[in-house]
Image (cartoon, rainbow, N blue to C red):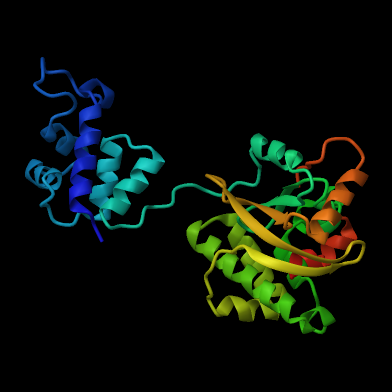
Amino acid sequence: MPNRAELAAFLRSRRHRLHPADVGLPGTGPRRTPGLRRQEVAQLAGISVDYYIRLEQGRGSHPSRQVLGALARAFMLTADERDYLFRTAGELPPHLERPTSTPPEAVRHLLDAMDGVPAYVVDAKGDVVAWNRLARHFVGDLDQAPPERRNLLRWIFGHAAADPAWDDEHTVAFAAAMVADLRAAYGRYSGDPGIEALVDELLAASDRFADMWSARAVQRRRPIVKRVDHPELGPLEFECQLLDVPGTGQRLIAYCAAPGSPTREAFRRLQAEEPPGTGTAPACTAAHAATAPAAIRR
């Protein structure tokens, strides 16, 4: 629902902070109040002065998305301010950002600093693009795999239809969750060539993926508790947390074990056994690339 009073106040605040020179208008001498005049805003946005005045007074009709976009341009709003303008007017903001596959340098530093916590970063289409040293025990040594083999969905749906992995209800549930997450990215980043190409590839390669995709489930992945039987560490239980990396479409996925738990102790032992050196890398061995490790697919 639109918040007319807040929309009016926000418009006034944006108008007051601008000067004619900021938007390419000539100065016209002293002004009684700071900022642009209402008629100047209307001129910049291509709307009538009377309509803009009604918006600032909280009594205008519901502004269209076109009007909101014009006002955002007239006020030179940042992306966050534009989103706030749209939401205050009762509209969903447009998604102008595109997903990227290069993690920010600060995120790489964060991964290195996460002692005792396996963590990795995935982009919007499920490519693993960075990880720390402990994560290699769960996602494999990714350095040796070509970029096209570093994708979670390819790992999952690379299983043949008769593969026993599909008898595991956890694997099926995780696969469905990944498809719903991909569907959410498909809508959020409409027209992205990387996401569209992956969808087309999986539709042609996997009937199971095609069935799940046709269900049109849409849901971003949520934090979950995972219980896995690791081949080296035995039974493990940890919470899989997902943290958004703003403006990239990427998420940092961390395996968080409870303090004092056997899993936390297992992670601590792994950390102590790791040789010194830089941990993060820019994106499984070929063997791991064919099938997702249990800690990934469950």
Instruction: Point out residue 75 in the picture as x, y percentages from the top left corner.
Output: 27, 35
Q: Residue furthest left?
A: 50
Instruction: Point out residue 217 in the picture as x, y percentages from the top left corner.
Output: 53, 75
Question: Would you say 59 lies left or right of 137 here?
Answer: left
User: Which quarter of the image is occupied by the C terminus?
Assistant: bottom right
Residue 294: which quarter of the image? bottom right
Q: Residue at x 49, y 59 (%)?
A: 188
Looking at this view, is 178 or 125 the one in front?
178
Q: Residue at x 62, y 62 (%)?
A: 223
Residue 11: which quarter of the image? top left
Looking at this view, is 97 or 243 the one in front?
243
Question: Would you say 97 lies left or right of 121 here?
Answer: left
Question: Would you say 63 lies left or right of 188 here?
Answer: left
User: Which quarter of the image is occupied by the N terminus?
Assistant: bottom left
Instruction: Point out residue 117 in the picture as x, y percentages from the top left corner.
Output: 76, 50
Question: Would you say 64 lies left or right of 203 here?
Answer: left
Residue 31 vertical position relative to residue 192 in the rendered view, above or below: above
Instruction: Point out residue 149 in the picture as x, y percentages from the top left corner.
Output: 78, 58
> From where the camera sits, is residue 151 visible?
yes
